[in-house]
Amino acid sequence: MPSFYDDNADLRWYLEGGIDLELLIRLTEYDPGGGPVQLAAPDAPASVAEAIAGYRDLLGAVGTFVAESVAPRWRELAEAHPKRVGADIEDAPVVRELTQAFGEMGLFGLNVPRELGGLNAPMLIFQLSQEMIARADTSLCAHVGFHGGIAMAALLYNVLEGSATFSASPPRIDDLRFRELLDEIVAGRAWGSMDITEPSAGSDMAAIRTRGELGPDGRWTVTGQKLFITSGHGRWHFVIARTEDVAEGADAFAGLNGLSLFLVKAWDWGADGEKRWLASFSGVEEKLGHTASATVALSYEQSPAELVGERGRGFQQMLVLMNNARISVGFECLGVAEAAWRAATAYAAERPSMGKTINKHEMIAELLENMETDIQAIRALAVTAAVNEEVAQKVAIARKLVHVDAQRQTELDRIGRRAQRRSRMLTPLLKWYAAERCVEITRECVQVHGGSGYIRETGVERLLRDAMVFPIYEGTSQIQALMAMKDTLLDAVRGPTRFLNRLAKARWRAATGADADERAVGTLRLRALQAVEFLLTKLGAAKLKELPLSRPGAWSAALRQFDPKRDFSLAMLHADRLTGLLTDAVIAEILLEQAQKDPGRRPLLQRWLERAVPRAEYRYTVLTTTGSRLLARL
Ligand SMILES: Cc1cc2nc3c(=O)[nH]c(=O)nc-3n(C[C@H](O)[C@H](O)[C@H](O)COP(=O)(O)OP(=O)(O)OC[C@H]3O[C@@H](n4cnc5c(N)ncnc54)[C@H](O)[C@@H]3O)c2cc1C
């Protein structure tokens, strides 16, 4: 099988000049200055071009390994299950063998700075390799991800809380509080997990019951149950727990304020080398898909814990981990969707029906083209979200680590804030769209295969089963839609002039854009903004009575009296549709920008617009004409 990197021209495009990686590379190599490139990290590549060539080699090696050594073992992986062995939970031998092989390739320390034993590549390279692993097997992708992903989260937490120590010349991280975790993971001796969900707290994190308690000796312990934890059979756990009580009857989100984040070990090693259990694995789930990945229930009983960052700010801390994890799920979805599209394409080219192969039948041809278009659109969104998130994080790290003059620092802070805003806006759209579309694409793949698609032996029904979890974990699709809706509406309410300017610009662009593509991009933006305007006008109407939104002071008066639970109900009902409108518009903008730089990308933009514009009209119509009957019933 050809390398999953070499055979994917769209993925390669990003590493072959498609996007500008200079800033990301400079930040990664401790060279955040605005002048000539001077990559300053010890053993840094000599130039940006050399760094990119190194990443390409790395991705090429991962692509070859997954194509030759993982993908052909799909049957074995599909039948692999973790199992209980005494107090432990063990992965199937094939998972252990392949995970170890990824460790030997350096994947667990891919993003870890060289001075701490890693390869110091940007997170983007990790995420692109995750896509290729998921194309071969998504359980393996998840487990491998809980190595490097957790190591990087630990590093970031320590840098941001100020517990990492640095040298200035050459710039390097000397040590950090969670060094033991980092060293073990980079060496392939351990992995970690993210323990949020509980029996009665999933989407509703404010309902978390696990307690973090500070003993008289000044040490923290954690007590409670965690459920459905991916790779939760490892040693290191980022656990979210309640440390402050909230008043009964307070608003539904108030509970988020009383949470703190802890690092907890499931076991320690005794002097005799024996495991001394500090938490217990209370179960391992049997699932519809992702069968080789361990999904674990844990019990903590006064387990020793280390507070991460500030007490009571656990929800905000967890978002750091979750943002990265949600972007990574976007790439995971891409891998599975890519596998489905390729399997469907290959099968359709071979399968004869009524005098021709089925890829020549109109409806199947359209299905295949839709799949390909949407996968490339998701990749464009995923890479943009990933780069923005990483730039935001690395600007924050550079601030602690590298000295630049005041003018450059101001500029960097501006870049960091902008990247953070973009990442916050793009991440829920990516998670929502990639997950939902991946389920559809894998189902379409089964459909293209006809009866064979439904048979285990063919190997494509497993893609659908695996995909079904994407709209559930790392925040369900409904939660992503609610986040996107709330941020968008609040942004408009807080900056009404800015919002009205945007609306006017979009209207102008839709009518007078330079060409048909630009006008279509303008139309998509306009429809999304008009949907926001419609929802705000409706939501405000009850409060404002006959007061038009254009009257001075009307917006701020509405804002002062805003009750999210009551006043947002129409927007909550239509959050999914609004998210669809926003996603289509954002992807169109990204693809337009790509096409303006590289004419070879224009056909992709046009295929996207051809589908997105009528879809936007449909969504906008439903959003503006339905809902009151159902809401009256609730
Ligand atoms: C295979 C697998 C791996 C997982 N890995 C992890 C992990 O590593 N760490 C971890 O902490 N958790 C993990 N989870 C748990 C996962 O994150 C939760 O299942 C998920 O957040 C949903 O929570 P829930 O199951 O309690 O469903 P609920 O929160 O009860 O939701 C049920 C349904 O109601 C909807 N819903 C809930 N509230 C609202 C609302 N306000 N508006 C509209 N709709 C709403 C949801 O979208 C969903 O469709 C995993 C789950 C699975 C299946």
Image (cartoon, rainbow, N blue to C red):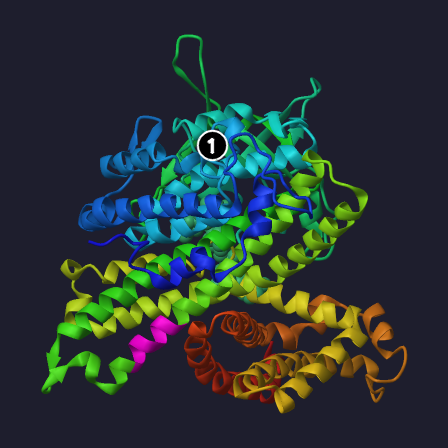
The image quadrant of residue 85 is top left
| Chain part drawn in magenta | 366-373
Residue in the image at 48% along x and 83% along y = 615
The reply to whether the magenta stretch includes residue 100 is no
Which amino acid type is shown beneath numbered disc 1? Gly
Q: Is residue 187 above or below residue 110?
A: above
Front residue of this view, candidates 68 and 344: 68
For residue 450, say whether it is visible.
no
Front residue of this view, candidates 279 and 405: 405
Name the residue beneath numbered marker 1. 118
From the top left corner, tell me how far across and down residue 532 is, in percent. 67, 78
The reply to whether the magenta stretch includes residue 371 is yes
Residue in the image at 35% along x and 57% along y = 335
From the top left corner, tell me how far across and down residue 20 is, in percent. 54, 57
Circle 1: element type: loop
Front residue of this view, candidates 171 and 333: 171
Quadrant where the image shows the C terminus: bottom right
Q: Is residue 165 above or below residue 509?
A: above
For residue 527, say whether it is visible.
yes
